[in-house]
Image (tube, rainbow, N blue to C red):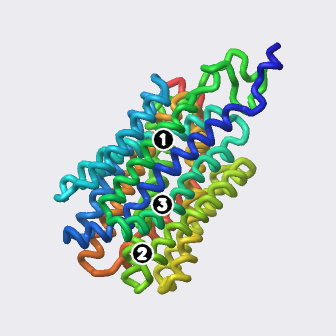
């Protein structure tokens, strides 16, 4: 009888698909900020540093809210928690369509959009709990939504702004966010065991007397590995944010057309998807540390290319391809490596804490690049800083070590 009632499709795959759509909407709309950037500067006359600051506030807030939302998902239904966050994000876009002074931009983008983005962090540990085998591959598939969002939404934003102006374009974003997130969240389940299932790849013997093991957040914070991984995540997000917020206006300044400049972010997204899925498969075979090493080497090379060779649409596209692939590769291994090093017991909260550290990178990358341009009328120094940071992450990779978990847990 039990065999007859087994679903033909493992429900974990339904979770991945639902999370994929949420990820696409969250990241696609958020990564379009660089497209709205130019319109806001032209209408209000704000400096690039001041306009970048709203993204920085959002990055800090979503890192902080990510920890809180992960705890709420542990306690309550992720359908309710993440659905509510999606609605608040949609309201944020509606409010953005009405801004007239800069504090409104900071409040609406820095708080309402951040709450929605904070809930994306909970998608990663949710998928991790559903898969023992194919874990990195499924994280890669889920995270591909980030890449797909960056492919389709920046050109959509650029087209909408050209037809309807930026205010109504924000309203269209709000409708898309609320509709898709509310539908997708109806399929979310936090833990397979709560509905009588077990993770994919876990045997009956492993499932018997199952108990989540691993370090708590306070125990993790006392380890070198926590700060090392957090630092590498900081570097990755610093570099990524610098590019995604400023590359559109930087390309415009190099006499690249607006359509070609918007397509840079789309090409980034295409190769980000490729990086996520290729590296998800490779991480399951060769380990996350190898992916870190190769990816940060390629990221360093991409910034050297940007500084020395990117002068027209084609060379910008080459940069976007390399940077996108490496960004996707790095992104997908953070959740699996946290599970490997710290266990599953508090993975969501630990990932949220590491993401909060990384959010300072997003805040710093966005506003520092804007300040550098306002002073020097060039992004060159900002891109040099990114190249140096990426190279330092290559060195950091050699210090990643397994934790003697039993010794830490006993403290």
Per the rendering, the mark at residue 384 is 2
Per the rendering, the mark at residue 339 is none
Q: Quadrant of the N terminus?
A: top right
Q: Which residue is mark 1?
A: 181
Crowding at dot 1, Cα within 10 Å, few <14 / some 14-19 / many 20+, comes out as many
Looking at the rendered structure, the secondary structure element under dot 2 is: helix
Crowding at dot 3, Cα within 10 Å, few <14 / some 14-19 / many 20+, comes out as many
Where residue 102 appears, as percent x and y from the top left, is 19, 58
**Is residue 407 among what the camera can see?**
no
136 lies left or right of 350: right
- Sequence order check: which comes first, mark 2 or mark 1? 1
| Picture quadrant where residue 82 is located | top left
* Residue drawn at the location 41% of the way across and 36% of the way down: 67
Q: Check whether the beta carbons of the residues at disc 3 and disc 2 lie within 8 A of each other.
A: no
> Can you say whether 70 is above or below 290 in the image?
above
Label 1 to label 3, Cα distance in Å? 16 Å
- Mark nearer the viewer, 2 or 1: 1
Crowding at dot 2, Cα within 10 Å, few <14 / some 14-19 / many 20+, comes out as some
Q: Nearer the viewer, residue 139 or 227?
A: 139
* Residue drawn at the location 59% of the way across and 26% of the way down: 191
- Mark nearer the viewer, 3 or 2: 3
Q: Which residue is mark 3?
A: 153
Q: Check whether the beta carbons of the residues at disc 2 and disc 1 lie within 8 A of each other.
A: no
Where residue 43 appears, as percent x and y from the top left, is 22, 70
219 lies left or right of 291: left
* Residue drawn at the location 42% of the way across and 51% of the way down: 358
Which residue appears farthest toward the front when viewing the image?
Answer: 163
Label 2 to label 1, Cα distance in Å? 38 Å
Label 3 to label 2, Cα distance in Å? 28 Å
Where residue 320 appears, as percent x and y from the top left, is 54, 71
Looking at the rendered structure, the secondary structure element under dot 3 is: helix
Q: Nearer the viewer, residue 95 or 117?
A: 95
């Amino acid at each position: 009888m039990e065999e007859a009632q087994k679903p033909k499709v493992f429900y974990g795959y339904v979770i991945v698909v639902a999370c994929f759509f949420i990820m696409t909407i969250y990241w696609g709309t958020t990564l379009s900020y660089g497209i709205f950037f130019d319109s806001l500067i032209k209408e209000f006359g704000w400096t690039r540093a001041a306009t970048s600051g709203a993204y920085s506030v959002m990055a800090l807030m979503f890192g902080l809210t990510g920890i809180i939302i992960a705890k709420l998902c542990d306690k309550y239904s992720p359908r309710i928690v993440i659905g509510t966050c999606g609605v608040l994000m949609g309201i944020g876009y509606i409010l953005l369509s009405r801004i007239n002074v800069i504090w409104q931009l900071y409040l609406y983008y820095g708080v309402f959009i951040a709450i929605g983005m904070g809930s994306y962090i909970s998608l990663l540990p949710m998928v991790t709990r559903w898969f023992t085998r194919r874990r990195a591959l499924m994280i890669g598939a889920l995270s591909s939504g980030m890449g797909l969002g960056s492919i389709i939404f920046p050109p959509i934003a650029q087209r909408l702004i050209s037809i309807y102006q930026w205010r109504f374009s924000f309203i269209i974003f709000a409708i898309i966010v609320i509709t898709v997130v509310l539908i997708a969240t109806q399929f979310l389940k936090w833990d397979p065991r709560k509905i009588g299932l077990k993770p994919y790849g876990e045997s009956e013997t492993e499932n018997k007397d199952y108990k989540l093991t691993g370090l708590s957040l306070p125990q993790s914070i006392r380890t070198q590995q926590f700060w090392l991984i957090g630092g590498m995540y900081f570097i990755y997000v610093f570099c990524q944010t610098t590019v995604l917020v400023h590359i559109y206006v930087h390309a415009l300044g190099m006499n690249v057309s607006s359509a070609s400049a918007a397509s840079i972010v789309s090409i980034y997204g295409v190769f980000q998807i490729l990086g996520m899925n290729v590296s998800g498969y490779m991480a399951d075979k060769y380990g996350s540390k190898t992916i870190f090493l190769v990816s940060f080497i390629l990221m360093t090379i991409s910034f050297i290319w940007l500084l020395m060779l990117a002068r027209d649409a084609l060379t910008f596209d080459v940069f976007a391809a390399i940077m996108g692939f490496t960004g996707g590769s790095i992104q997908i291994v953070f959740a699996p490596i946290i599970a490997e090093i710290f266990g599953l017991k508090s993975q969501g909260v630990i990932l949220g804490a590491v993401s909060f550290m990384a959010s300072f990178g997003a805040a710093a990358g966005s506003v520092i690049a804007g300040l550098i341009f306002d002073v020097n009328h060039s992004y060159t120094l900002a891109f040099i800083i990114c190249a140096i940071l990426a190279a330092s992450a290559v060195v950091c990779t050699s210090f990643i070590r397994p934790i003697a978990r039993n010794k830490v847990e006993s403290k």
